[in-house]
Image (spheres, rainbow, N blue to C red):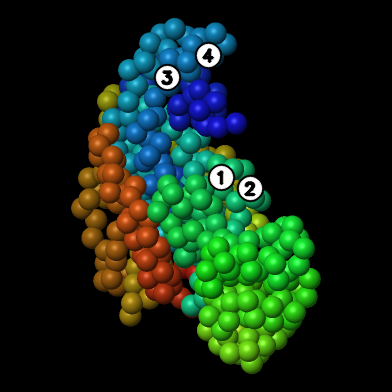
Amino acid sequence: MTMDYFDFSPAMMTDMYEYTMLDAALHDGTASRNCVFEVFTRHLPLRRRYGVVAGLGRILEYLKDFKPNESDLQYMHDNHIVSDDCINWLRNYKFHGSIWAYREGEMFFPNSPILQVEGTFGECVLLETLLLSVLNYDSAIATAASRITSAAGNRPCMDMGGRRIHEWAAIAASRAAIVGGFAGTANLAAAKKYGLKCIGTAAHCFTLVHDTERDAFVSQINTLGKGTTVLTDTYNIEDAIRTAVEVAGPQLGGIRIDSGDLATMAQRARKQLDSLGATRTTITVTNDLDEYSIAALATAPVDSYGVGTRLVTGSGCATCNMVYKLVERENGAGQMAPVAKKSFGKATTGWRKRALRSYQYGLAQGELVLAGSQKALDSWKAPAEYGDTKDLLICAVDHGDVDESLMTRDALFAARDYHKAELAELPISALSLSEGDPAINTETLNI
């Protein structure tokens, strides 16, 4: 099925209760109350030491078309989901509010106010499911990608996970992986949409369909050139390398190893290639890699990694457990006031937030989350004890006006560069792959 088969707008990528709440709020008058919602996570999954924000650019793309179409409205009418009054209101829906967010590539920690949405209750409540869907998945993939590329060091990592995940999620994963430091993808749709480097030559079936491995290599090299990368472990790696160099000469671009003891195979392959004069032929390894197996390959003569299943499933954490909570609203007197849950284990902090990161000697020391009225937040000055500070929230939507510069290819690669720089400013413990406490602490102050 193509996306055209599904005749609905992004405004239907939500839970039903967003619309039933809207319907009731329209009837009792609270839909027009000004509100502030925030996205945050109470804890990092699997006791990871940091998270990486990704997905803001995709959210802004969706927001531009976030309005139920006539087919959507007819469906809601026919299935008695909302009243006719609500359907008439939805015909004129447009998000006129503002969104402040951590930029893509930014680190987040428990209680970081990753996204802040301000507008009327009616406008904001409909965004919840879509915002969480994008941020939870994309940030999980970006975080996994960051851990994987940190383990890889200067060796590039490429996304090869499209066949292991939902077809649309695969495109989102390719994009999020770039934020976390990946160099490109095997997914053509993602490469086209986001202007990514795309990689791929041949699979085992290509070797198997030919009468001999030599025939397969001759065909590939004649078609794609001597600089191509051949897959060498269909039968016997040593024989395959010898045959590939005989066919392409020492100009053979690369080999890929997809099975076995990758460290040992890479070492033997490097020695053999060098002995045959193919000293510049690169070695790529694949086969269910993650940050741990890549870290174990640090001393092996590997030039690049292809990462699939573990990347697109968040390396064990396919979500960040982010939530979307109302923290401030206009009361019956027309004044903005804080609201908060007191549920056991799920308590929240009222008021909108201002987030800062403190630094000393160029290293991040902590995250400071201020809670208070807009006037109090604007006037607060950091005491000297916090050292240098940086505000973390940027304006992505200003009273309905979307900052389209945050949706571009340049913005995506700028997010990757920004993430790399920010990672270098965290305490070195952040790079540890073992479970542990967040790399920096988050302090919340009510002002």
Q: Amino acid at mark 2?
A: Ile
Residue toward you, 320 or 337: 320
Residue 358 appears in the figure? yes
Q: For residue 45, which quarter of the picture? A: bottom right
Q: Quadrant of the N terminus?
A: top right
Residue toward you, 353 or 23: 23
Task: Write down the residue under mark 4.
Answer: 75
Task: Write down the residue under mark 1.
Answer: 169
Q: Amino acid at mark 3?
A: Asn
**Sequence-first tag of 4 and 1:** 4
Q: Where does residue 417 sit, x and y in percent of width and height?
A: 37, 66
> Could you tell me how far apart the alpha carbons at marks 3 and 2 are, in whole angstroms?
29 Å
Question: Which residue does the image show at 35% across and 21% down from the upper left?
Answer: 93
Left or right side of 199 for 363: left
Where 1 sits versus 346, above or below? above
Left or right side of 27 for 343: right
> Could you tell me how far apart the alpha carbons at marks 4 and 2 are, in whole angstroms?
29 Å
Q: Amino acid at mark 1?
A: Ala
Q: Which mark is residue 165?
A: 2
Disc 4, disc 3: CB below 8 Å?
no
Q: Where does residue 16 sit, x and y in percent of width and height?
A: 55, 23
**Sequence-first tag of 3 and 1:** 3
